[in-house]
Amino acid sequence: MPPGSAPVCVWCQATSTTMWHRLPNDQIVCQICYTKRNLLPSSDNNDSSTQKRNTSSSTASSSSSKGNHRDKGNGSSGRTRSQGQAKSSLVSKRGRRSLKKRKPIKAPSAVASIVTCSRIFYQGIKYQVGDIVSLVDIQGGIFFAQIRGFMQDQYGEKSVVLTWLLPTQPCPDHFDPSIFVLGPEEEVCRPMDCIEFVCHSPAKFSAALPTPYAAYAPLVQQSDAIASLLAAAEEIDKSQSP
Ligand SMILES: [Zn+2]
């Protein structure tokens, strides 16, 4: 078949068909003859590709069409392989690029927080909540207080929250639980180096220590609610039991 000429079916001499088919012996047949002879199993998936290949090869010279066909046979798989390689290389390239471009996740900056505790070691002495400490003011007067809590700030400095103890006798020079009463609670915290350990919590002041079980006013305020709840529960029990 000369180049540029329209394909002609070698069996029925048809010049137009829905699809041209190239036989293994390099003869071109029309769709009707192709399905009639059923020389090759026609697959629906390769129809368009086969047609494209045939139309393109039909314009090519018949002398080189054999080699062209063989090359195409190999070339299809080669093309898919090269495509696969290109795709994989593209993916890997993209992966590397995105790896390079990706912003590194910032580690959260360490935030020092204040630590509160119920006991603390300071200069070899174990202080705990409730301990009685003494403080000396700028004029040399000595004051006593009870530790209400400890705090360690973000710089590791330990401080203490105090409840002042008020003397019932004028100017005591030593701590005696019998002559002191609980005074105002201080809201600010003082550094640990301004206090001096006197003794652990005496029984008189241990009741003032903060406990998870409120022993004072809150219970009084809640007593009504608790009593009503208990009464309601008792009523429910009575009504349920015959
Ligand atoms: Zn035909």
Image (cartoon, rainbow, N blue to C red):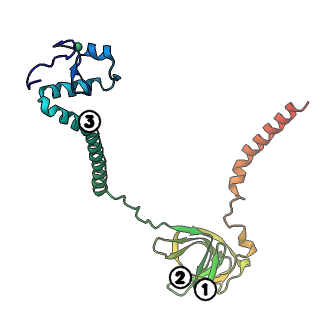
Kindly check if marks 1 and 3 are in contact, taking CB atoms under 8 A apart as contact: no
Q: Report the residue at 66% width, 70% height from top.
A: 182
Foreground: disc 3 or disc 2? 3
| Side of 213 where 65 appears, left or right | left
| Image quarter hosting the N terminus | top left
| Side of 116 where 83 appears, left or right | left
Q: Report the residue at 53% width, 82% height from top.
A: 194
| Side of 4 where 150 appears, left or right | right
Quick one: SS at disc 2? helix
Quick one: SS at disc 1? loop
Q: Report the residue at 74% width, 72% height from top.
A: 204
Is label 2 within 8 A of ligand 1 (CB to nearest ligand atom)?
no
Q: CA distance from mark 1 to mark 2?
A: 15 Å
| Image quarter hosting the C terminus | top right
Q: Nearer the viewer, residue 18 or 202?
A: 18
- Residue 194's tag is 2
Residue 134 shows in this picture: yes
Ligand 1 found in image quarter: top left
Measuring from the top left, give residue 134's x and y in whole percent: 60, 82
Measuring from the top left, give residue 141's x and y in whole percent: 56, 85
Amino acid marked by disc 2: Cys
Foreground: disc 1 or disc 2? 1
Which quarter of the figure has residue 22? Answer: top left
- Residue 124's tag is 1
Task: Please name the residue that numbered disc 3 is placed on.
Answer: 73
Q: Nearer the viewer, residue 167 or 186?
A: 186
